[in-house]
Each structure stands twice: as C-alpha cells, then as structure tokens.
Image (cartoon, rainbow, N blue to C red):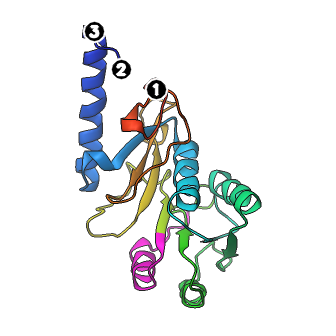
Amino acid sequence: SSTHQFGRKAKSAIETARKNIAHHFNVTPSEIVFTSGGTEADNLILHNAVSHLGVQRIISTKIEHHAVSHTIAHLQEKYGIAVDHVNVDEFGTVDLVHLETLLSHTAQKTLVSLMHINNEIGTILEVEKVSQICKRTNALFHSDTVQTIGHYPIDLQKTSIDFLVASAHKFHGPKGVGFAYFKKGFGISPMLHGGDQEKGARSSTEN
C-alpha cells in the first residue's frame, strides 16, 4: 500500500497474481479478493450472504469443513437464519433430489453451501448439476473449493458458482494467503476495517 519504489513493486506483483488467477477461472480481476486463507474467505462469503445480500436460509451438509459448518452455526445463532442439511449417502455423495426438494419448498432467499471435494474422504460434488439446480430455483451457490484449486479445472463462465474460495498452500503457494471469488454484481461488506485494502473489501496489510 506504500507509494515508495518497494511498495509499488509489491503492488504490481499482487495485481499480476490477481490477473493470472482471474484468467485461470475466466473471470475479471475485480471478482478476486485476497484473504489470509480459505477460512477467512469462507467467513467473508457467508457473513456477506446473510448481513449484506439478504440470505435468510442456508442449505449445507453435516460433513462440511468447520470453516463453513461452524460459521453457519454462528450465523444461525446471531441472525436467526434457517438452516437445512441436505442428505448424503455412505460415501458422502450429496442427494441432489433431496437438494432440489429443499429448494422448491421455500420462498426465502437461500444460499447453498457445498464443498467441491471433501477434505477427509475425497468425495467430488457434481458442481455442474448443483449449479443448474440453484439457477432453476434462484438460489445462490457457494462452494468451498480449497481442495480443488490447482488440481481440478473450473471455468466459471461454464459452471455458475457465485462464490468460491482457495488457500494457496494447497497448490504450492505461500502459507497465510488465499482468496475469495465474488461473482460480479455482488457487493462486498468487509469484515475487517481500517486500511481499505482490496478496494475496501478487506483491510489489512497485504501478504
């Protein structure tokens, strides 16, 4: 954030990284927000969905990473949002019929939060099908993709995911940095205030 030579050089490196990441996902650089890692990125997305985007209900599973499940529990306690858990089978596969049933029986603004690849058992979510279900039912779709990025291709122009997250150390990047993807059109209300870094989305000295 400094205007001296070293600060400008660091800023250039950060923005080059942002552009490279955006190109990888076929999105614009302004849709990428750097964070301290996947946990902060999940928190930023889930808090924004409820406090800023008007989400009244979250659908998830009981086998999500704690960065998601504990945050949802906190939001339920703080804001009184409705929380439903979609069924999974003995392999951790999400029951898409049950998901569609849950989504078709509500008028509340809903966010579906399902991890792409499970961090403990490796089950892969059918993100294409989930994104299509969410699109049909006007639900927002957040996916914890920490285990995915760098190993599994995602084109966000072909797969309609509204929010996803990454943690750099999962694909040979530095520890202590990650990012959140917010689809264009969704404003971001920051959780951290003070320096207005990341265009006001996340204050704190850059990694």
Label 2 sits on a secondary structure element that is loop
The amino acid sitting under disc 1 is Gly
Which residue carries the number 1 mark? 195
**Placement of the C terminus among the 4 image quadrants:** top left
Q: Is residue 139 magenta?
A: yes
Residue at (55% x, 36% y) in the render: 192
Q: In terms of sequence position, does the residue under pointer 1 or pointer 3 come before the other? A: 3
Residue at (60% x, 90% y) in the render: 105
The answer to whether the residues at label 1 and label 2 have Cβ atoms under 8 Å apart is: yes
Which residue carries the number 2 mark? 1
Q: Does 22 sit left or right of 1 as displayed?
A: left
* Quarter of the image where one finds residue 50: bottom right
Spatial distance from mark 1 to mark 2, Cα to Cα? Answer: 9 Å
Q: Does 24 sit left or right of 191 as displayed?
A: left
Dot in front, 1 or 3: 1
Categorize mark 1 by other alpha carbons within 10 Å: few (<14), some (14-19), many (20+): some
The one nearer the camera, 90 or 42, is 42
Label 3 sits on a secondary structure element that is loop
Spatial distance from mark 3 to mark 2, Cα to Cα? Answer: 9 Å
The amino acid sitting under disc 3 is His
Residue at (66% x, 80% y) in the render: 87
The answer to whether the residues at label 1 and label 3 have Cβ atoms under 8 Å apart is: no
Dot in front, 1 or 2: 1
What is the number of the mark on residue 4?
3
Q: Is residue 77 magenta?
A: no
What is the number of the mark on residue 6?
none
- Residue 143 location in percent, x, y? 49, 62
Label 1 sits on a secondary structure element that is loop
The amino acid sitting under disc 2 is Ser
Instruction: State the extent of the magenta-drawn residues as a range.
Output: 122-140
- Residue 58 location in percent, x, y? 61, 70
